[in-house]
Image: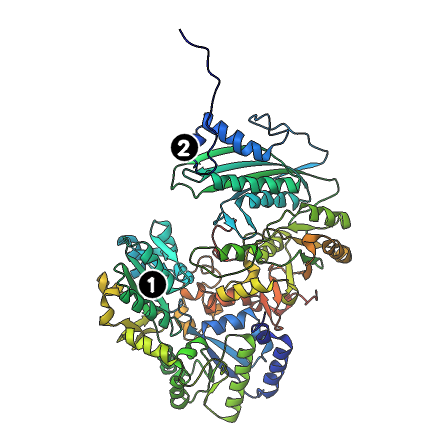
């Protein structure tokens, strides 16, 4: 009655003109095809390949560190990066700020119906390249699709785990009076790069996002000085807000020197035009290090020896201050508070 | 950064500060009002107060466009956005100004109103042209600096026959506000606000020139120094004011001569006169109703006037009773003399408009100067990096 079953044929994903549709999130064949033909192809590694619900992973000895970060940046592609590379760097950096070596990433995608598959492929390729160059594989993931109008193209949540070596104890509450405050390079690049591409704001600029993975810089710093007290990446809210968080956690004040804080000339000019303060503009490839004074020269040397720390600077000191004010000597010679960010200078920056 | 760093040089600032300290007579006090929020912001952000001797005090004036916007005007905009379904475009700071019933444009946006932040009036017109099926209203605020761009956009909207665009005009006039302060009983008769001179507006003066200030200098016997928004400009202006006071002069001097002339920008003035006319009266937050202190859109542009187009009627709404913005805007009180400063009223939850904009006296003091309010013993010792 019936002929022999024909071999399965599935039309390949149309990565040129195709779009995400609701079937891609339904869990059926279309989902499997998207996962296999797009995600697995890009991220391929021995832990992801079996496509089990959970990845089973070997872990070296040490304390486990885990961090998660959702990415909703608009526009999805911006000068110096895109949501894919940002999602990898953002979570690697959060893990690294605990002093850990990041080991694995998990990625959750929320896709909007109608999003071009060609753009999705670009995002995934960039994410895979970022993961590969950082040496941190994406080992498990998830994809959901929401109706058109219920999302904005693509949102990505990444979770990372890593391991901290024995003897490394970093935390925002560890800053002590007299410690040196370092920043690893120029501030404000990411926020201004995003802003330069925003709707209604067409100024020509060469400014690139500083999006970068900082775990190798962290390893170099900790090798030079295992007694580093605090590492933090000043993302949303910028340098000012992050320093205020540390001051509050540690119950100390800070005194910064405005002249010492590195700001690229293009970023300074853009901020001047837009009425922004670079101290509050987001970074995605910079870190703050708070270091005991006797170790500051060793740490500065370690910064300068690493490509991501060449423009590192000692920008201030931790002070005794019951009000936990972060203050700054201005370039002019006056003094001011550097307060927490108020409101939102720029929504959806990362 | 070129053309900026030159005006923020610490060594030159030190020289100017030394000259002010040398020339200010220890036998008297000097109280100068900086009219503009831009100057308030520069003074706070660069810590200029630390460079002045204790007998030279700066009083923050009302020249912050967001701060002087009364609740009733913001209510008009919120109602347009919420009840008439328009796309309401405005400058960023305006969105957070507290209005009636604990609302603000930002909160209205969360309730579903289509409120958009723009960087220029031209962007609002662009939005109107891109969405012809929606009414688009530009909520125009500001002193003489932002008025010409609004005028230009109104003229363009008329020549392009954009049928869905209008402007809710709140443009106000600097000279009227200065006269109002000088005429206030605190300054004129009671003497509770001793004013020895004005740091005059920077950008406003590029448009209106220095001539309009000659009247105050002469009639009210107050020196005026027009100056730029850079910290060295401000310091030099203070030195010039100290010298005028010492020599008994009450003149209009122009420190900002690199961009400001006596007659101002005649082209911009002509453009403004073509599109706008004087309002008989306008309510200012802090100053109350001030005659001939604001602009309205001329009848020739009536179809682009949101007040006419939507039949809006202004309803004055009193400020929160505890809020001292009014007295602070007139220089009668300092921010710290307000009971709710830093407690109920902070930049995160502003009750009054002076706490909204970073140019407002309260927000500037809260964000940049709060450390000055504590007992000197608690101040941390300076540590050099």
- Which residue is labeled 1 in the image? B139
Above or below, A188 relative to A6: below
- Residue A128 numbered mark, or none: none
Q: Chain of mark 1?
A: B
- Residue B323 in picture, x, y percent from top left: 40, 65
Q: Which quadrant of the rendered structure holds the C terminus of chain B?
A: bottom right
Q: Residue furthest top?
A: A1
Residue B286: in sight, yes or no? no
Residue A310 in sight in this render: yes
Q: Which coloring applies here?
A: rainbow
Q: Which image quadrant is residue A92 in?
A: top right
Residue at label 2?
Answer: A22
Give B207 or A121, whichever is nearer the viewer. Answer: A121
Number of numbered callouts drawn: 2
Q: Residues within 10 Å of mark 1 (few under 14, many from 20)?
A: many
x, y percentage for residue A330? 61, 69
Q: Residue at x 60, y 62 (%)?
A: A264
Q: Is residue B230 above or below residue A177?
A: below
Report x, y in % for residue B253: 47, 87
- Real-space CA distance between mark 2 and mark 1, rounded to the nearest whole angstrom: 40 Å
The N terminus of chain B lies in quadrant: bottom right
Question: Which chain's residue wears label 2?
Answer: A
- Mark 2 or 1, which is nearer the eye? 2
Residue visible at 26% across and 63% down in the picture? B161
Of residues B244 and A159, the one nearer the viewer is: A159
Element on which disc 2 rests: helix
Mark 2 neighbour class, 10 Å CA radius: few under 14, some 14 to 19, many 20 or more: some
Residue A292 in percent (x, y) is at: 74, 55
**B185 displayed left or right of A41:** left
Kind of element beneath mark 1 = strand
Rendered position, A108 above or below B276: above
């Amino acid at each position: 009655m019936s002929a022999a079953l024909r071999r399965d044929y599935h039309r390949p994903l149309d990565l040129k003109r195709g779009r995400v549709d609701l079937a891609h999130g339904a869990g059926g064949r279309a989902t499997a095809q998207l996962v296999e033909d797009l995600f697995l192809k890009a991220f391929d590694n021995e832990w992801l390949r079996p496509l089990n619900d959970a990845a089973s992973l070997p872990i070296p000895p040490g304390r486990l560190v885990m961090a998660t970060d959702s990415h909703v940046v608009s526009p999805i592609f911006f000068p110096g990066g895109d949501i894919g590379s940002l999602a990898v760097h953002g979570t690697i950096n959060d893990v690294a700020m605990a002093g850990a070596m990041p080991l694995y990433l998990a990625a959750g995608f929320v896709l909007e119906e109608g999003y071009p598959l060609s753009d999705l492929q670009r995002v995934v390729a960039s994410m895979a390249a970022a993961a590969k160059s950082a040496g941190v594989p994406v080992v498990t993931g998830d994809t959901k699709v929401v109706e058109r109008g219920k999302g904005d193209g693509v949102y990505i949540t990444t979770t990372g785990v890593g391991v901290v070596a024995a003897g490394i104890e970093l935390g925002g509450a560890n800053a002590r009076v007299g410690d040196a405050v370092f920043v690893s390079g120029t501030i404000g690049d990411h926020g201004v790069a995003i802003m330069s591409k925003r709707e209604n704001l067409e100024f020509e600029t060469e400014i690139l996002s500083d999006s970068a993975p900082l775990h190798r810089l962290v390893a170099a710093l900790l090798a030079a000085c295992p007694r580093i007290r605090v590492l933090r990446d000043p993302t949303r809210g910028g340098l000012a807000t992050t320093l205020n968080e540390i001051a509050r956690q540690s119950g100390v004040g800070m005194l910064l020197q405005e002249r010492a804080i590195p700001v690229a000339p293009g970023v300074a000019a853009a901020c001047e035009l837009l009425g922004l303060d670079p101290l509050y503009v987001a970074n995605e490839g910079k870190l703050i290090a708070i270091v005991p004074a006797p170790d500051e020269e060793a740490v500065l040397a370690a910064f300068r020896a690493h490509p991501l720390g060449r423009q590192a600077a000692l920008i201030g000191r931790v002070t005794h201050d019951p009000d936990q004010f972060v203050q700054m000597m201005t370039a002019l010679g006056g003094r001011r508070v550097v307060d927490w960010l108020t409101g939102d200078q720029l929504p959806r920056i990362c | 950064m070129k053309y900026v760093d030159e005006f923020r040089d610490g060594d030159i600032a030190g020289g100017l500060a030394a000259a002010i300290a040398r020339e200010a007579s220890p036998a008297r006090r000097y109280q100068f009002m900086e009219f503009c929020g831009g100057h308030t912001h520069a003074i706070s952000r660069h810590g200029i107060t630390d460079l002045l001797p204790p007998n030279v005090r700066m009083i923050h004036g009302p020249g912050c466009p967001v701060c002087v916007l009364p609740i009733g005007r913001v209510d008009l905009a919120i109602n347009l956005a919420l009840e008439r379904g328009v796309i309401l475009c405005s400058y960023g700071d305006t969105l957070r100004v507290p209005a009636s019933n604990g609302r603000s444009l930002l909160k209205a946006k969360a309730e579903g109103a289509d409120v958009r932040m723009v960087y220029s009036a031209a962007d609002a017109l662009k939005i109107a042209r891109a969405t012809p099926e929606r009414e688009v209203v530009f909520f125009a605020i500001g002193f003489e600096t932002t008025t010409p761009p609004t005028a230009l956009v109104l003229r363009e909207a008329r020549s392009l026959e954009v049928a869905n665009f209008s402007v809710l005009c709140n443009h106000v006039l600097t000279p009227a506000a200065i006269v109002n302060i000088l005429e206030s009983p605190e300054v004129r008769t009671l003497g509770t606000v001793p004013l020895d001179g004005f740091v005059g507006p920077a950008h406003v003066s590029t448009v209106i020139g220095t001539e309009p200030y000659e009247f105050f200098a002469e009639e009210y016997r107050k020196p005026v120094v027009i100056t730029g928004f850079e910290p060295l400009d401000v310091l030099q202006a203070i030195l010039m004011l100290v010298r005028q006071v010492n020599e008994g002069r009450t003149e209009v001097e122009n420190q900002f001569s690199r961009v400001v002339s006596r007659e101002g920008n005649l082209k911009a003035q002509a453009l403004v006169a073509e599109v706008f006319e004087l309002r008989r009266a306008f309510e200012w937050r802090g100053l109350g109703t001030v005659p001939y202190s604001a602009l309205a859109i001329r009848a020739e542009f009536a179809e682009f006037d949101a007040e006419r187009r939507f039949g809006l009627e202004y309803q004055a709404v009193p400020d929160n009773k505890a809020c001292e913005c009014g007295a602070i805007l007139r220089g009668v009180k300092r921010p710290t003399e307000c009971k709710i400063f830093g407690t109920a009223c902070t930049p995160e939850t502003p009750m009054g408009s002076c706490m909204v904009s970073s140019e407002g006296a309260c927000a500037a003091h809260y964000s940049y100067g709060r450390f000055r309010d504590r007992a000197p013993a608690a101040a941390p010792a300076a540590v050099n990096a």
